[in-house]
Image (cartoon, grey):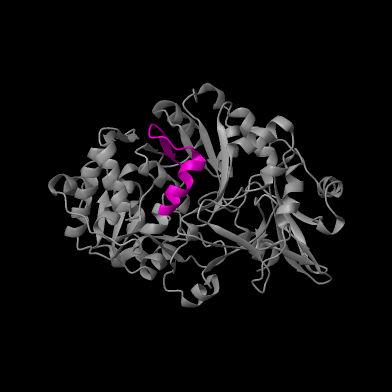
Amino acid sequence: MLTMVSALERVQRLYGARPAIIDREGNFTWSEFFDRVTRVAGVLRDLGIRQGDHYAILCRNGFRHAELIHAGYWMGAIPVPVNYRLAPPEIRFILEDANCTTLIVEDALIGLAATEELSPWRDRILYVAPGRTEVEWPQYEALLASTPPVDCHLSNEDDDAILLYTGGTTGRSKGVRLSHKNVFSNGMQVMHPMGIRSDDVYFHLAPMFHSADLLGTCFTQCGAAHSFLAQFTPAEALSAIQDFGVTVAMMAPTMIIMTLQDKSFDKYDLSSFRLLFYGSSPMAVEWIRRAMERFQGVDIQQGYGLTETSPILTPLDPAEHREALDTGEYGILKSTGQPLVSIDLRIVDDGDQEVPTGEAGEVIVRGPNVAKGYLNRPEENKRAFRDGWFHTGDVGSVDENGNLYLLDRKKDMIITGGENVYSSEVEAALYQHPGVNEAAVVGVPDEKYGEALFAVIVPAPGADLTEEQIISHCRERIGGYKIPRRMAFVQEMPKSAMGKILKTELRKIYGGE
């Protein structure tokens, strides 16, 4: 059975004596972690959580967060990791939308539980802290120590395993129903392309409420170890790689850029580190090159995926990165690679007809890792999941070798004066300017052209940019109709939890959306 229960049972049986958790708060073998998970399942049962129930997890990254997720898999309940960076009304929306019976809160976030918006759950809280604390709620470690293990629930492959809410970059957040088969399958799909080994130590840097963290599934399936960072800072990340012998990490481009710019970078021993996987949003070729130069001897791989695909669809092989650096031919780095095994990927027009190789259209996919659908969203399910295919809403093309090139989100394509402009193409030109640290291009209303291009730019430290400089720079690289004539220079961009620039917010600020 392709279930996360069978995955955990297998790793305990085959790799029980090997390290599962390497953490500042303690180290556990797979047998010890397995025992804790089965006891946590008993704690959740005693709190009234039953098979099929949703329960919310409001915690930062940590091994207890991992235990809480696996305990749900084990007992047939459905964990709902919640973005703790959301405002209380947004958190309440998720708890109500998912009908969460219990709220599990880490000590560092207990202030959120005290807000008026979350008061309906105040008598249904499990308090998570390393040790005993004087609070009114049931306490995680104390209950775990006194609760015996419980037997697993034999879930079916198509049963819901986890409910993850999208980041809300295109509107109100949606709950994505991922089955055991979805999560298990994607772990198997990425195992070979990533070259996962049982002696790896995977570093959980992506927030565990984000689908990117599901990348850790393949490391569990192989009996590798896991390490966690509660809150990302470049120095803490580099220190943990050194101290815990981290071998593999997934980082969003924003994290990579911040780490490369950290003044303490060169003082850490990164010799254990063998693979840097980046994703969540595109990264400019210039930053890819810098990462390959600074992380010497480390393979670099990127992947494209969505919450609805559990999450990875296409990885770009490290060999492609190395060849690009060696030859100076960086074109392939604009690709996200080829579809994983058992994934069908097509590029279609607005009539769902496949377009010729090299032409742009919507990316649609099908495979065992594609979600069951959205919770409580029948109309959106009809639009996104139809005729056996998931319609991603991303615009892309494939080359003669089957490599996927992403151009834009459908909503981010700008039509100005009757011409289609992909903001990613304009952003790629902007990133070639040495004084540009970050750039995003959106469409704003324009009386003459319908829409006009608006560039939002974060200058590099010490750079003194002007509109004239940017326009002159772009004129040498892209057609005149693609050049933004209106722009703003800012200190920082609005971003999601994974560091993805929120163009919906930029359109509100500069386009009056």
Nearest the viewer among 399 and 423 is 399
Residue shown at 52% from the left, 49% from the top: 498
Residue 309 screen position, x and y as percent: 49, 58
Instruction: Say which quarter of the image contains residue 103.
Output: bottom left
Identify the magenta region.
Answer: 185-205
Is residue 200 in the magenta section?
A: yes
Nearest the viewer among 339 and 23 is 339
Residue shown at 29% from the left, 51% from the top: 6
Residue shown at 45% from the left, 52% from the top: 186
Residue 428 screen position, x and y as percent: 73, 48
Instruction: Say which quarter of the image contains residue 102.
Output: bottom left
Is residue 289 in the magenta section?
A: no
Residue 106 visible to the viewer: no
Residue 16 screen position, x and y as percent: 25, 37
Quick one: quadrant of the C terminus?
bottom right
Q: Is 133 positioned to the left or the right of 320 in the image?
A: left
Residue 369 screen position, x and y as percent: 46, 58
Across the whole image, how many numbered discs are drawn on residues? 0
Residue shown at 34% from the left, 61% from the top: 157
Q: Is 498 positioned to the left or the right of 229 in the image?
A: right
Quick one: quadrant of the N terminus?
bottom left
Q: Is 83 positioned to the left or the right of 459 in the image?
A: left
Residue 417 visible to the viewer: yes
Nearest the viewer among 81 and 137 is 81
